[in-house]
Image (tube, helix red, strand yellow):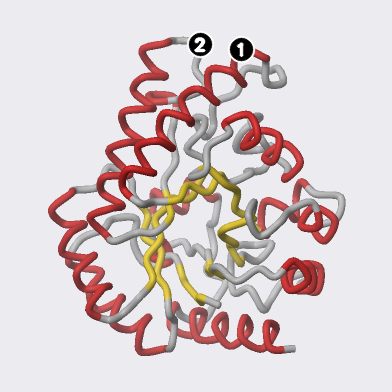
């Protein structure tokens, strides 16, 4: 199992300021690291990727789209912008040495039409994702679609919807991830949602508390997560995704206005111990 953590806990930028954080993540005992890619610089990604490689960390990356480059837009120009930006993000992911690009990059986060997804939106987006997945394949990167809660998107909220979408895309490099924060909102039963998946479908898991703080706190029923993952033979990445209120952009996006943990170091140490204990039981 790869135990990973997303650096959004500290920064929304990939640059040399992350180097001491990467070293700390490695020193605590994580075997993987996840980098957010929001307007990334290719040269800086190479530097950070080299550092992660020196430490032997398994790298993944994450991103999202907005109204400016929404792959589900009825405007063909905007959809093309989404394709182009996702491809650029994949190039930066390759520079990082990332094995997977995860996230809700299939649609614009915060973009709503006031209606459910239409057949045209489904078709346009699947076509866009298929083209992007082909670029990912050329770089040796897998893509893992994130099912996000209804307050952030109307397009793919549940695992059942996500499965139907990846079947429509029908590309070997386009798969699903599972995020416990979003699933806690959207799924009637997280265990039953996971039981719909096979190890071929599911290639990434975000371990995130219901309030986005330390995973071992809060009210998520973790036995509904770990038991079905073990049952299916999951052996990919368990990645901690937690946020604080120190980054204005991230605090605004995630609606976190108070600090909910002692320190970033304490959070990542407790989270790693929590994942290892639960996987060993």
Can see residue 272?
A: yes
Q: Nearer the viewer, residue 68 or 104?
A: 104
- Contact? badges 2 and 1 (CB < 8 Å): yes
Q: Position of residue 25 (x, y in %)?
A: 37, 80
Q: Relative to the observer, which residue lies in front, 188 or 129?
A: 129
> Which residue, given by chain and number where applicable, does mark 2 sit on?
74
Quadrant assignment for the C terminus? bottom right
Task: Say if 246 sits above or below 166 in the image.
Answer: below
Left of 98 or right of it: where is 279?
Answer: right
Q: Marks 2 and 1: which is nearer the front?
A: 1
Which image quarter: residue 179? bottom right
Q: Nearer the viewer, residue 82 or 184?
A: 82
What residue appears at the point 31 percent right and 79 percent down from the top-left corner?
56
Residue 275 sits in quarter: bottom right
Q: Secondary structure at mark 2?
A: loop
Residue 33 pos. (x, y %): 40, 70
Residue in front for this viewpoint, 85 or 231 = 231
Q: Where residue 55 appears, x then y in whole percent? A: 27, 81
Q: Position of residue 263 (x, y in %)?
A: 46, 80
Distance from the alpha carbon under mark 2 to that under mark 1 = 8 Å
Residue 52: quarter of image: bottom left
Q: Earlier in the sequence, mark 2 or mark 1?
A: 2
Q: Residue at x 63, y 43 (%)?
A: 148
Residue at position x 37%, y 27% from top? 83
Disc on res. 120: 1
Residue lying at 19% horizontally and 48% vertically, measured from the top left: 41
Crowding around mark 2 (Cα neighbors within 10 Å: few <14, some 14 to 19, many 20+) is few
């Amino acid at each position: 199992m790869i135990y990973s953590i997303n650096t959004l806990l500290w920064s929304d930028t990939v640059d040399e300021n992350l180097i001491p954080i990467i070293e700390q993540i490695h020193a605590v005992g994580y075997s993987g690291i996840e980098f957010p890619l929001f307007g990334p610089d290719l040269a800086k990604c190479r530097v950070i990727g080299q550092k992660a490689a020196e430490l032997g960390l398994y790298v993944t990356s994450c991103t999202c789209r907005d109204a400016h480059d929404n792959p589900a837009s009825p405007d063909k120009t905007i959809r093309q912008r989404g394709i182009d930006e996702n491809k650029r993000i994949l190039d930066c992911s390759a520079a990082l040495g990332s094995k997977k690009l995860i996230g809700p990059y299939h649609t614009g986060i915060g973009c709503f039409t006031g209606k459910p997804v239409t057949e045209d939106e489904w078709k346009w987006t699947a076509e866009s994702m298929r083209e992007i997945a082909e670029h990912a394949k050329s770089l040796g990167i897998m893509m893992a679609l994130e099912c996000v809660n209804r307050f952030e998107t109307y397009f793919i909220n549940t695992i059942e919807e996500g499965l139907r979408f990846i079947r429509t895309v029908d590309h070997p490099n386009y798969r699903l991830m599972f995020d416990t924060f979003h699933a806690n909102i959207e799924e009637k039963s997280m265990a039953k949602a996971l039981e719909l998946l096979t190890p071929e479908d599911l290639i990434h898991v975000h371990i995130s508390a219901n309030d986005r703080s330390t995973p071992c706190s809060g009210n998520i029923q973790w036995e509904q997560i770990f038991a079905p993952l073990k049952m299916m033979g999951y052996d990919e990445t368990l990645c901690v995704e937690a946020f604080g209120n120190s980054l204005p952009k991230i605090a605004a996006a995630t609606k976190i206005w108070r600090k909910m943990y002692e320190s970033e170091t304490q959070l990542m140490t407790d989270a790693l111990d929590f994942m290892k204990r639960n996987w060993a039981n």
